[in-house]
Image (tube, rainbow, N blue to C red):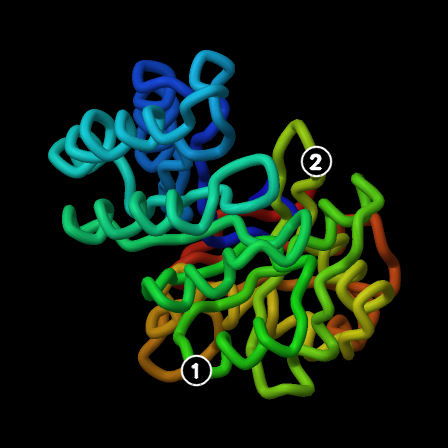
Amino acid sequence: SMIAHGTLALEIKSGYGLNHENEIKMLRVAQALKQVFPIPIFVTYLGAHAVPAEFKSNPDAYVDDIINISLPEIAEKKLADFVDVFCDKGFFTPAQAERIMKAAANLGLPAKIHANELGYTGGIQVAAANGAYSADHCEYVGDEEIAVLQKSDTVPVALPGTSYFLGIPYTPLRKMIDAGLAPAIASDFNPGSSPVYNMQMIWSLACTQQKLLPQEGLWACTLNAARALRIEKHMGSIAIGKSASFVTTQLEDAVRTIPYYFGANHIYSCYLNSQLIYKAN
C-alpha cells in the first residue's frame, strides 16, 4: 500500500518489543522484508522507545542492557542500519540517549533520535552533538534548537500525521525553512500516534497546517527525506547520476494539486531504477 501511494524508500523502526528477544525478532522481520519488496528498506533499532515496566524504578539498568546485550548482537549480525532513542519527558534523558548513541557509534551504527515531541527536552541538542542523521518529531523547536541545527548535519524530520492524530503542536516548519534549514517530513506510520501511510496526505498537512508552499512540501518528502537516510546522492530527486526512481500522476499541475486534493491517492505509476514496480488498475 505504501508503494501504491508513492513511497520509494522506507525506514522501519523496531520499538514495540521493549526486551531483547522481541526487539531482535522485529529487526529480523524488517530485514526479511528487504528480500520481498523492491524498494530500499532501512532498519532502525529503537529498543529505547520506552522504559519497560520492570525497569521503571531503574531505567539506567535497561540502558545498560541495550548497550551491553542488544547493540553488540545487532552490530555483529547486521540487523540494523541505525539506532534510535526516544529522548523526551517521561522516556529517556539526554544523558541516557547520549550513552546509547555513543555506544552505537563505537559499533559502527549511526544514530537517529526521537526529539522534542513532548517539550523542550534537549533531544535536538544531543542529536546535533552526536552527529545523528536525523531528529524525528521536533514539535517543540525554538530559536536555540534552530541555532543548533544550523551548525549540524542532523536533518529535522517533522511528522504531521502525529500532530493531527494526537492533537499536539505541529513542528514549526515555516520558521525552520525561513531560518535556512532543510527539514524532511515523514508519515510516522505506527499504531499509537499516526496510523497513516499516505505520504500525499502528509504533504497536504505540511502545506495546510505548517504553511509550506507545495514545492517546499515536495522537497521535504523527497530530497530532504533522502538526506535523513543519507541516500541523497542516489535518490530523492531526478538528476544526472541518480537512479531513475519517480512516480507519475494523471493530474494537471501535480505539484500543486496533489496536496490540494487531500486524502486521495493520485499515483498512477511508480518506477524504481527505471523499472516499473506499480501501476494503478
Q: Secondary structure at mark 2?
A: loop
Residue 146 in view (yes/no) = yes
Q: Secondary structure at mark 1?
A: loop
Direction from residue 180 to residue 97 in the image, left or right: left
Q: Looking at the image, which is closer to me, 156 or 28?
A: 156
Residue 257, image x, y percentages: 83, 69
Quadrant of the rendering where the C terminus is positioned: top right
Cα separation between marks 1 and 2 = 30 Å
Q: Which residue is mark 2?
A: 193
Residue 161, image x, y percentages: 73, 48
The image shows residue 67, relative to residue 204, as above or below, that is above
Direction from residue 57 to residue 183 in the image, left or right: right
Q: Residues within 10 Å of mark 1 (few under 14, many from 20)?
A: few
Residue 151, numbered label = 1
Q: Amino acid at mark 2?
A: Ser
Q: If you read the primary sequence from the N terminus, does the residue marked by circle 1 or circle 2 appear first?
A: 1
Q: Residue furthest front?
A: 57
Q: Residue at x 59, y 36 (%)?
A: 90
Residue 5, image x, y percentages: 65, 48
Residue 76, image x, y percentages: 11, 34
The image shows residue 252, relative to residue 119, as above or below, that is below
The image shows residue 253, relative to residue 272, as above or below, that is below
Q: Residue at x 43, y 18 (%)?
A: 55
Direction from residue 68 to residue 154 in the image, left or right: right
Quadrant of the rendering where the N terminus is positioned: top right
Q: Residue at x 54, y 81 (%)?
A: 147
Q: Residue at x 59, y 75 (%)?
A: 144
